[in-house]
Structures are given as C-alpha cells and as structure tokens.
Amino acid sequence: MLLNIISQLPEGFTDLGVTELHDVLGGPTLIHLRTENSDKKPLYLSTLLHGNEISSHSVLMQFLKRNQPLNRDLIIFIGNTLAAKEGLRHLPGQVDFNRIWAEGNQVEHKIARQVKDYAKEFSPYASIDLHNNTGKNPFYACINSLDQVFKNLASHFGDHTVFFTEPHNVQSMAFSKICPAVTIEAGLPGETEGIKAALEFVETIYHSDSIEFSNDRAKKDIYHTIARFKVDPRAEVDFEDSPFTSSDLSFVSNLDSRNFEIVRKGARIGYADSLEYLLVENNKGENITDQFLAIEDQKIIMKRTFIPSMFTKDIYVMKEDCLGYLMEVMIPLNAQR
Ligand SMILES: [Zn+2]
C-alpha cells in the first residue's frame, strides 16, 4: 500500500459511495485540485482517517458538487479506503490512521510522512480533519495549539473547543506545525445535522480571506483534556448499572449522555468489584486512577469533579482506544482579544 497522488478527480467521483472509493482509488490518496487562483493558499481537507466515520465522505462529495469551479486550490487526503469499504474504523491488525502522524516504522507512518511533506510544500491556508464520535457528543472542534489563529479557526464549528496534546500522533497535531489545523467532531457517523454543520464550516473557511474569531459561538471556553479512562481488553463490560451482573464492569446505561456536562465529585458511573479493569491515565501515560476513582460498596465513584468527552458505549472502541476523556475548563476562547 503506497500513497497515490493525483491532480484530477476520477470520472464520476462525486457520486461514489464511501464503500466504492477503494476499488476506484486503490488505497490512501492525495488529490491536489489546482485553480487559476494561485494567489490564495490551498485548503487541506482530511477525510476517512477512520473508515467508519462516513460524514467526512458526505461533506467532501457535497462540497465538490457545490463548489464548481473551485476558486481556491484544494488538497484532499482520503485515508483508510480499505477500512471504509468494510465499514470499520480500521481493519483488524491495521494501525489506526489517526495515530500515524508522528514517529513509527510501519508503511502507514511512511504514507503520513509523505502526505505531510507534500502539503508542507504548498503551505496550506488551513487544515481540516473531519471525524465522527462513537458516543453521543455535541459538535465540537479540537486544536493542538493555543495560538490565536487556531482558536479563531475552531470558533467557527460546533458548541465547544477542546485543546489536547495527547494522543500526540494525530493528524491535526502534525499539521499544526505547518498551518492552522483543526479536528472536527461532527456527531455520530452519517448524522444529517453533523454533515450539514461540517459542510458549512468547510465552506466558511474555504471562502474566507483570513481566519477571524467567530462571535456567533455562545460558549467561548476551551476545554483541556487532562486524562483518559482505559478499559482492560480482558474485561467483561455491560451497561446494566448493576452490582449483580457477571461482568467485571457494569456501567450506567446513559454513560455517553453526559459528554461536555459537569460530572460532580461523588457521582457513580457504574459498578465493579475492584479497579482491576478500569484505569485513569494522564497525558504522560502515568496511572492516576487513585486521584479520580474509588470503589465504595461495589460502586465506581468519581473522586473529583470533571467534564467528560467522547465517552462511548462501543466496547470495541473503549478497549482499543479509550472509554473517554476527562477535561477541565481552561481559558476563554477569545481570552487574548
Ligand atoms: Zn475519528
């Protein structure tokens, strides 16, 4: 699997379904569409790093249909086409395409380096990486730098802005060294509202002449990811919220309904006999479970107030990636203005 670089859309491209891309493109593909308008820097658009996060595909296709002819160069990366064909985040045994943007020796790391080197040469105006969540979340944007232009970029999408430094090997982190970069989390895969919001965002940025702060945003705080919950792959998990099941972890059934809301100290998130299968890890990878979790009469109790994000009920995702992130409010989005 190598990177394809093409400068034209294959025939009938904008009508291709997400599962059809792989047979046409053959693998990860960079499409550089050039226009007469060479005084404008290209917009970089990243799609399908996770093969089952199909909103990015809908956004790309609708954007291309609505913006002909283009009036700014566009560099499009279509990531894990093979996983998209199978409807999976990534194939079993394959690396996660949004964890390949730093050091690493696999062929996917090499592809990521090629993509980054290619984009760097054309100094993009901005980089937008489109994703979905597996759990219920409001729409939000993630940044990996607190420079004002990053906050400005993020202010145009969703209700919230999240700043994080781990995982460090994501696309938006790598591109933040090249240009203003953002990760868009547009709700559940294929959700109409999320596609609409993400498409509007891409169009706003694409047609803008400079990236200014959007005052439309009601909530101007930035959330900072400080730690994440990890679930042992050996654990039996259910959502019965009961001390009487045979599972190792029995979480509350609405675990993902409190994303971006304050969860107070003393709150119960489920039942377990011990913390053998659940841990909290900070950004340095250190185990800080003791600061956050306790077992009292089999109840899993929060020892500190926090704001969750990306809490998921998808057992595969929680074991492979994480159950969710713990955040705290950092600073107002427009603090330096
Ligand atoms: Zn994703």
Image (cartoon, grey):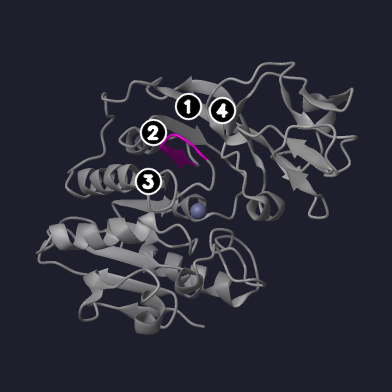
Amino acid carrying label 1: it is Ile
In the displayed structure image, the side of residue 196 where residue 72 appears, left or right: left
Q: Is mark 1 within 8 Å of ligand 1?
A: no
Are dots 4 and 1 in contact, CB under 8 Å? no
Q: Is mark 4 within 8 Å of ligand 1?
A: no
| Mark 2: secondary structure | helix
Query: Which of labels 4 and 3 is toward the front?
Result: 4
Relative to 159, 300 lies left or right: right
The residue that disc 3 covers is 180
Q: Is residue 103 above or below residue 199?
A: below
Query: Who's the residue at 63% across and 63% down the image?
Result: 103
> Closer to the camera: disc 4 or disc 1?
4
Considering the numbered disc 4 on the image, is that residue within a helix, a strand or a loop? Answer: helix
Query: 298 and 69: which one is in front?
Result: 298
> How far, Cα to Cα, is label 2 from label 1?
9 Å
Quadrant in which the C terminus is drawn: top left
Q: Quick check: is 20 in the magenta stretch? A: no
Mark 4 neighbour density, 10 Å: few (under 14) some (14–19) many (20 or more): some
Q: Is residue 190 above or below residue 282?
A: below
Q: Which residue is mark 2?
A: 151
Quick check: is the Cβ at mark 2 less than 8 Å away from ligand 1?
Answer: no
The residue range painted magenta reads 136-143
Position of residue 109 in the picture relative to residue 337 (left or right): right
Between 27 and 116, which is closer to the camera in this rendering? 27
**Type of residue at label 3?**
Pro
Q: Position of residue 41 (x, y in %)?
A: 23, 56
Q: Which residue in the structure is indicated by mark 4?
A: 258
